[in-house]
Amino acid sequence: MRFLAAAAVLMLSASSACGQTDQGALVDVDAVRLEPMTQTQSVVGQFVAMQSSVVAARVDGPVLAVSVTVGDAVEAGDLLAELDTDRLQAALDLATATLDEQRAGVESATATEALFAQDVARLERLRGSAAFNQARLDDAIAERRRAAGELAEAVAGVHRAEVARDLAALELDYGEIRAPFPGVVSARHVDTGEYVRVGDPIVTLVNHHDLEIEAAVPAATVGGLSVGRHVQVRVSAGLAVMAEVRAVVPVEDPLTRTRVVRLVPELDYETAGVAARQSVVVEVPTEAEVDVVTVDKDAVLSGPAGRLVFVVEDGLAQPRSIEIGASLGNRFEVLSGLEPGDLVVIRGNENLRAGQPVSVRGS
């Protein structure tokens, strides 16, 4: 009796573990659908950086320090390297002193011009009197004009000195080499102590926050990639995303008969961990859409005789062999064995038997 009671308990536990109810096994179902599908051709492309450049020196000088190394991530404005700026600082000090001198010259010329202007005004007031002397007035007018010319030259000198000061300050600022955009250092070209000249490379910087996909698509199929169209891109074995066609370059390579296409992927670059020049596969549409029968991938089981699903008919689970075709996201194309509207089990189908009663969850 104890043996029979234990066996009954085990049978009840097993029945509960398998999701059994009084009405049968508890399952989730999904309807077989008729959906549009487009045939595609796989084309290999790669991620390309929208910004990638060699950051170069803007002034001559010895390298005082390099603040980054290969692999470092930087933000726009971060310090990459410093040059010895003693000479540049001295040049700025000299330009500042010259500017002060020119400004003093303007003050002196302004005072001289004002003095001659007073003489002219005083002599003009004597016009019509016995003390008036035309020659003296003419001389005073000439002196005022000369003083005005000297003042204009002094003002121009101040402007030149201001420009020279600004240029010296700019070159001093260029002694600190900073990142022009956010990115990752992919190469370091100098080290402390080296002497660089204008245009010499310091580091190579790649913007890893802003990547596009570039693919050379055969000219015969590029017509399926109109600007704004979304296509599937396989980034890696376990990651497929959609990408929007941004541009189709209207230049054809005469050797490969391909055209360059740029696509913007719907992708979080930080979490995806992609890199510039990483290969991807672009699924290029090759023909017009056709309607195909599709089934949820979770419904498909593999058996000794091939692929099968459980179809719910009159509350019973009936196995049915099917033939599948292309993968369409989380569904398979069905070549034979199912019709649109068939209800297939997508959860709870692993332990089903032919003809077993089932209860649909939520119904």
Image (spheres, rainbow, N blue to C red):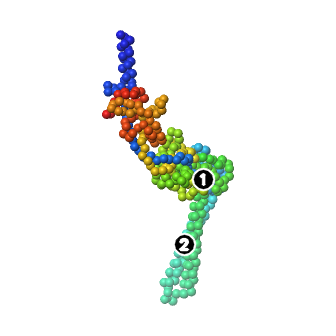
Task: Identify the residue shown where x is 38% and y is 31%.
Answer: 318
Residue 339, image quadrant? top left
Q: Earlier in the sequence, mark 2 or mark 1?
A: 2
Residue 24 at x, y = what percent?
A: 34, 27
Task: Identify the residue shown where x is 61% and y is 44%.
Answer: 70
Task: Identify the residue shown where x is 55% and y is 78%.
Answer: 144
Depth check: give the residue in front, 94 or 135.
94
Q: Quadrant of the N terminus?
A: top left
Q: Is residue 63 visible?
A: yes
Q: Is residue 110 above or below residue 87?
A: below
Q: Is residue 100 above or below residue 295?
A: below
**Name of the residue lying farthest toward the right:** 194
Task: Identify the residue shown where x is 41% and y is 38%.
Answer: 338
- Type of amino acid under label 1: Thr
Say what secondary structure mark 1 lies in.
loop
Q: Is residue 30 above or below residue 39?
A: above
Depth check: give the residue in front, 193 or 31.
31
**In the drawing, what numbered circle is on residue 110?**
2
Q: Quadrant of the C terminus?
A: top left
Residue 30, image quadrant? top left
Foreground label between 2 and 1: 1
Depth check: give the residue in front, 111 or 346.
346
Q: Is residue 18 left or right of residue 203?
A: left
Q: Is residue 339 left or right of residue 95?
A: left
- Type of amino acid under label 2: Thr
Residue 204 at x, y = what percent?
A: 60, 49
Residue 49 at x, y = what percent?
A: 55, 50
Q: Is residue 96 visible?
A: no
User: Few, some or many C-alpha atoms within 10 Å of disc 2 (few <14, some 14-19, many ≥20)?
Assistant: some
**In the drawing, what numbered circle is on residue 256?**
1
User: Few, some or many C-alpha atoms within 10 Å of disc 1 (few <14, some 14-19, many ≥20)?
Assistant: few
